[in-house]
Image: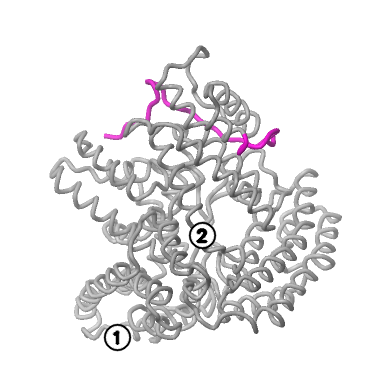
Amino acid sequence: MHTTARLHGRARARTFSLRRAPQAPVASLVSEWATAASRRRALTALIALVAAAAGCAGDGGDTGTPDVDEELAMTVDSLADAYVAAYFERNPESATSEGIEGADHAGVVDNSLQGLAAWHAREDALLAGLDAVDAPPAGSAARLTYDFLRETLEASIGRRVCRMQLWNVSPTYTGWQANYAFTATIQPVGTPDGREAALARAAELDRFIDTETVNLREGLARGYSAPRTNVRSVIEQLDALLATPVEDAPFYAPAQRDSTREFGQRLAALIRDEIYPAIARHRDFLRDEYLPAAREAIAVAANPDGEACYRASVRYHTSLQVPPREIHETGLAQIEKIRTEMQQIGERSFGTSDVKALLEMMKSDPRYTFDSRDHMLEYAQAAVERAKDAVPQWFGLVPKADVIVTPYPAFQEKSAPGGEYNAPSDDLSRPGVYRINLYEADKSSIAGLESTAFHETYPGHHLQIAIAKERTDTHPIQKYFGTSGFIEGWGLYAERLSDEMGLFTGDVDRMGLLSNEALRAARLVVDAGMHALGWSRQQAIDYLLANTAESSARATAEIDRYIAVPGQATAYMLGNLEIRRLRAQSEEALGRDFDIKAFHDAVVEDGGVTLAMLRDKIARWLAAGSGG
């Protein structure tokens, strides 16, 4: 049975707004609180700061002096409030993406090394504040917030060893060109204030891009660089952007959603006179100065402290601390299990037990590839609608927000992943977005598309993330932050669940499910292989091609993504295995009393928690006899 988290008998109804900017440094007040002789005085100051900065309104109970337990809960909430407010103050684009009330839609992150150092000081002070308080009791709402904030801070601080800001030349979602292209598509317009904010943000991009050049040049001086393969891909992306007519550019998207002629003219002028010249300067720097000096080696181990960076990155993305060799061997073992299932489907439906031949058939036989881009898009949309209709039979919690399917922009699709999800706005005025890659659709296998659609929408990312955002009785940190180990693990779990739900069209699509699972298992093999065990880029590409239905172009894009973002690719299968283990444990413990809806609600209701937090949650859920 699902129960709402409580604080002294009252559900915590919380909202989050950024209508007012902080009037004093969050970090200095947290530091004062952590060291002051009178904690209560500094705690009061911190709560006042957060209320002014973020407009957070929680159920704080009576206005008198709180008892010890309530003071501890208030302290933890206040530290988490301070983190959320400070994060979105620093990253206004993220506040726009999340659709937070009062977000600064004109701002752009300060990507200078000085700006990053200031953010590090804030993180350090917040962690010091958290270190200075006792952990709340296990199972309490305050403990959930405490553990969530601690992991967020510790993982981020640990990953500093990578110095990503000095070598982030990325053709995938971590590249600025991908992020700002997407931000433009959701930039609020339609009002005078909205138009002015959009123009102000666009006017900041040349500064941002030039600063990226400064950072990368400093990285070269310190011995850090991205690998040449990724640099070449980014140069190709920037060439494609510069060849795009201004009014077709992704940065022009706000004007395409606003009918004010003058606004469109001013935005076009900014793109033509400021953004495109900045992109050209950066492209020329990458081509003429950076590429010749970039590393040939693909492993992050080639950078200073690279081995430590890989381990820290695995922890950052998965919330687990797993040695590279163990990651690699887990992947190999999972590949063997999945190949056995592929053989069974091959014998049942395709007249062969030869997995290599079966996968090649899925990739090259015209019967199993799409006819066109429209065919591919329509196939995904139909899968999403089918899944949406089935969700209430398997979940008690169902999101209110809708989700739409839309293609990647043309300049990005060659090197983009197969799919990507972006969350809806808080007020539901903007739906969730599943971005699908239609590149070379006529060479793309039907196998895998339904499974990816379920992963990105229902019952995967959209369901889990939208539910977290719509909850009113959890701290905002659980709405906007999370660990890939849980979030991507849930997405992969959702693919297998979709077969239980009867969502797949047939065995071609079930082969796609297995191919997708094999891709996630292969990620364990190749990610650890490339970054820690000496694998080459081509060796990794060949391994994907041999074990999945991925096309050559898609496999290459996948591998370049793993090279650019070490450790992230391991999150999917490691998280999935843990969620599947917890379900099997629950089914065994509860027997006939096991309720799949209650289990799913227990797993997703707290947001993108760490895998250790989920493990503890399910243990308490079972101890309470929660079968329905």
Q: What SS does tag 2 mark?
A: strand
Mark 2 highlights which residue? 434
Query: In the image, what residue occupies the spot 31% across and 73% down?
Result: 511
Q: Quadrant of residue 273?
A: bottom right
Quadrant in the picture for the C terminus:
top left
Q: How many marks?
A: 2
Residue 608 lies left or right of residue 583; in this view the side is right
Label 2 Cα neighbours within 10 Å, binned few <14 / some 14-19 / many ≥20: many
Front residue of this view, candidates 595 and 490: 490
Task: Return the x and y of residue 194 as percentages of the image width and height.
Answer: 75, 46
- Tag 2: residue type? Tyr
Q: Label 1, label 2: how many angstroms apart (C-alpha)?
A: 31 Å
Q: Quadrant of residue 517?
A: bottom left
89 w.r.t. 251: above or below: above
Q: What SS does tag 1 mark?
A: helix
Query: In the image, what residue occupies the spot 56% across and 67% down?
Result: 407
Task: Return the x and y of residue 182 as percentages of the image width and height.
Answer: 63, 60
Residue 148 lies left or right of residue 361; in this view the side is right
Quadrant in the picture for the N terminus:
top left
Q: Quadrant of residue 222?
A: bottom right
User: Which numbered disc flags the more N-terminal residue, 1 or 2?
Assistant: 1
119 w.r.t. 55: above or below: below
Task: Return the x and y of residue 7 as percentages of the image width and height.
Answer: 40, 25
Is residue 259 shown in magenta?
no
105 w.r.t. 358: above or below: above
Main SS of the magenta part reads loop
Residue 142 seen from this side: yes
Mark 1 highlights which residue? 356
Query: In the image, what residue occupies the spot 38% across and 27% down?
Result: 6
- Tag 1: residue type? Lys
Q: Are marks 1 and 2 in contact (CB under 8 Å)?
A: no
Bounds of the magenta segment: 1-28
